[in-house]
Amino acid sequence: MKNIPFNKNSILLAPMAGITDSGFRRICKEHGADCTYSEMISSKGLFYNDEKTRQLMSYSTHEEPIILQIFGSDKECIKYAVNYINRNFTPAAIDINMGCPAPKIFNNGDGCALMGTPEKAYDIIKAAKEVSDFPVSVKFRSGISSRTINAVEFAKICESAGADFITVHGRTRDQFYSGNSDMDIIKRVVENVSIPVIANGDISDYASAHKALMHTNAYAVMVGRAALGNPAVFEQIKSGCCDADSTQTNHYIFEIADRHLQYVIEDKGEFQAVKEFRKHLLYYLKGIKNASVLKQMSCKAISYNDCMKIFDIASKNI
Ligand SMILES: Cc1cc2nc3c(=O)[nH]c(=O)nc-3n(C[C@H](O)[C@H](O)[C@H](O)COP(=O)(O)O)c2cc1C
């Protein structure tokens, strides 16, 4: 299909702020993610030349195809961000975040707040589309609250503004991550637009991915939290694997974690990498017996060797 940087039934790595940096994208790509996303990038931060914001955009060929996700509600800042991407990068697409529920984003009129100001959302998407050298997509939720579910109408607005594809997370802003992702609303979105729809929310294994694709008839699916501590989730879904030997799986996951850390070190240097990797250590230790001491060690890890020691002890505790 024209302008779509992945195939039907693909499995995409979700954008996750603080998680989907270069190292994490690379390890997920190696283990079956068909397309990766950056963390969300502030269009205002780019506009005001913020160095940290710019750094969030860097990526390597190992992570391609990659979609750069921007957020903001100021049309000029969005246009600036798209032009900045045009000049400096060649992503598979530019995604606009209209689903973020976090108060500091939402209360600023950004992220999911744009589902409550659809005319503004339309203008932003249209402006981005007019200047972008790349396909433009939008990621949003089922609505802001259970009383204002408007994903179908909002999807039509995205389509009429020129979005090339959309992603729908079947939860409202008020739900944050509680309850279940509503696959019925995603199905209704698919029925009401002609552009491809990516289904998102609670996809964690072969059964949930298959069910989401069958139920919604979405073009592809997106996996977020299930990749935390398990970047192999993409290949597991693809192989239809459901009950692999857990001991073997744990050893395999620690090997992956080792490589993941090495990629982060390549990118950020050992000190910064290990500091940022501590949260991933906690995810990798999920399900390990007597993990409390290991978790304490994780919070204090300052070197690659500290992390390897933790995996070594954890391997013996499986
Ligand atoms: C830690 C974390 C950070 C997230 N950051 C972003 C983000 O930057 N942009 C975005 O569109 N969604 C973000 N999300 C939402 C995910 O992309 C995804 O929509 C959500 O987690 C539901 O999918 P899942 O059930 O597969 O996790 C984030 C989610 C988590 C857990």
Image (cartoon, helix red, strand yellow):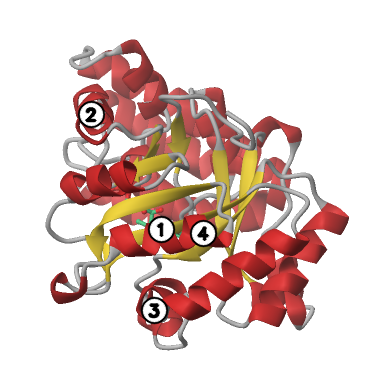
Visible residue check, residue 52? no
Q: Earlier in the sequence, mark 3 or mark 4?
A: 3
Instruction: For the N terminus, give its image quadrant.
Output: top right
Q: Quadrant of ligand 1?
A: bottom left
Measure the C-alpha gap from mark 3 to mark 4: 19 Å
Residue that badge 4 annotates: 160
- Helix, strand or loop status at disc 4: helix
Q: Earlier in the sequence, mark 3 or mark 2?
A: 3
Measure the C-alpha gap from mark 4 to mark 2: 55 Å
Mark seen at residue 317: 2
Mark seen at residue 113: 3
Q: Residues within 10 Å of mark 4 (few under 14, many from 20)?
A: some
**Residue type at tag 3:** Ala
Q: Residues within 10 Å of mark 2 (few under 14, many from 20)?
A: few
**Between tags 3 and 2, which lies in front?**
3
Residue that badge 1 annotates: 156
Q: Earlier in the sequence, mark 3 or mark 1?
A: 3
Check contact, mark 1 vs mark 4: CB within 8 A. yes
Residue at 24% in and 47% down = 188
In the picture provided, is 43 more to the left or to the right than 188?
Answer: right
Residue at 31% in and 23% down = 250
